[in-house]
Image (tube, rainbow, N blue to C red):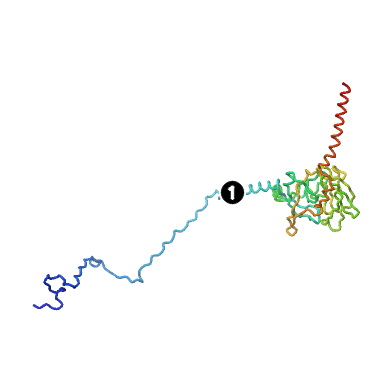
């Protein structure tokens, strides 16, 4: 029986037996194992176009629910405000007491160096801790007695505002209007001989005439004649507006012949800070830095020696006289 061409076996007959490939022919293809499909299991199979494949969407974060502060309990920064204010006031009080204090100019006696209403800063450190006051410095000092009248009451009608001003003045944030302080320029220190005037109308210190460009325009160095040797631990002071300044010249009949005690010095005014357009350093004029002024002065130690020396000699003579009398009597 003939076999159709399509029914012929894949392998040709060979003496080796059916199903065995001849030399040089490929081997048989292994059978594919039976894999069950969804269709064979009874599930419908349906293709999905790529355009219809769902895209994973990001999951939104849960909303933030604000937590309301507890009623009746202040937040941390509110509790810290009183502490910060107290620390700031304490620091201001320490600065005012030992370092720097603000003062305002109440009169015309220092024009045009300082005008009425100007604010100056005063260095209190050197005065409090034994620093020497120098000629030419602008200083603030307490009234030695009789230099200031009672003046008028500068208190405001609003008690709350006045209380705040008192607090700020106490800690040094505002100038005090109640303290009896004056501001002048130092012309002579202990041992200096200050004279008005030479043949050209100039004030001399230890015989050296002063060049004073800071004087109020049109003012003479002094309209009153005087000659004073400054005692130990005292100062001779004058205002720059000589025709409108009740300074040492006006109190020569009082204690110290118009000089003030160095212990009354509050400090040196070293800078004018208000108004801003007049802010400047208050430097010592060059005329006070001339070495011949120091050479002609009598040092405080020399003054002490000149005063105490004769007393020591008299005391020794008296002691010797007593000793001699005692010996003669015995």
Residue visible at 27% across and 69% down in the picture: 45
- The residue furthest right is 199
Q: Position of residue 294 (x, y in %)?
A: 82, 48
Element marked by disc 1: helix
The number of callouts visible is: 1
- The residue furthest top is 330
Residue visible at 73% across and 58% down in the picture: 276
Q: Position of residue 236 (x, y in %)?
A: 83, 47
Question: Does residue 47 appear anywhere in the picture?
Answer: yes
Q: Position of residue 231 (x, y in %)?
A: 84, 43
Residue visible at 75% across and 58% down in the picture: 278
Q: Residues within 10 Å of mark 1 (few under 14, many from 20)?
A: few
> Quarter of the image holding residue 15?
bottom left
Give the position of the N terminus as an image quadrant: bottom left
Q: Which residue is mark 1?
A: 80
- Camera-side residue of 235 and 97: 235
Q: Is residue 73 above or below residue 29?
A: above
Question: Does residue 148 appear anywhere in the picture?
Answer: no
- The residue furthest left is 1
């Amino acid at each position: 029986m003939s076999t159709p061409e399509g029914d012929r076996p894949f392998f040709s007959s060979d003496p080796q037996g059916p199903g065995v490939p001849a030399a040089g022919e490929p081997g048989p293809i292994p059978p594919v194992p039976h894999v069950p499909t969804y269709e064979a299991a009874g599930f419908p199979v349906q293709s999905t176009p790529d355009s219809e494949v769902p895209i994973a969407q990001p999951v939104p974060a849960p909303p933030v629910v604000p937590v309301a502060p507890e009623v009746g309990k202040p937040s941390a920064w509110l509790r810290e405000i009183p502490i910060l204010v107290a620390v700031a006031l304490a620091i201001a009080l320490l600065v005012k007491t030992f370092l720097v204090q603000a003062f305002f100019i109440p009169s015309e006696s220092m024009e045009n160096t300082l005008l009425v209403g100007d604010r100056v800063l005063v260095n209190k450190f050197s005065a409090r801790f034994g620093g020497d006051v120098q000629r030419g410095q602008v200083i603030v000092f307490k009234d030695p007695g009789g230099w200031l009248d009672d003046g008028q009451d500068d208190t405001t009608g609003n008690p709350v505002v006045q209380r705040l001003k008192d607090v700020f003045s106490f800690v040094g944030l505002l100038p005090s209007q109640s303290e009896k302080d004056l501001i002048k320029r130092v012309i002579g220190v202990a041992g200096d001989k200050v004279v008005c005037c030479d043949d050209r109308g100039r004030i001399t210190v230890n015989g050296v005439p002063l060049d004073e460009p800071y004087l109020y325009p049109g003012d003479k160095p002094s309209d009153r004649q005087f000659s004073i040797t400054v005692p130990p631990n005292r100062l001779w002071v004058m205002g720059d507006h000589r025709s409108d300044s009740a300074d040492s010249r006006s109190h020569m009949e009082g204690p110290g012949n118009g000089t003030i005690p160095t212990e009354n010095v509050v400090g040196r005014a070293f800078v004018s800070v208000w108004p801003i357009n007049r802010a400047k350093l208050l430097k010592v004029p060059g005329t006070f830095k001339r070495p011949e002024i120091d050479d002609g002065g009598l040092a405080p130690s020399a003054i002490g020696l000149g005063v105490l020396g004769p007393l020591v000699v008299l005391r020794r003579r008296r002691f010797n006289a007593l000793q001699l009398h005692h010996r003669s009597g015995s």
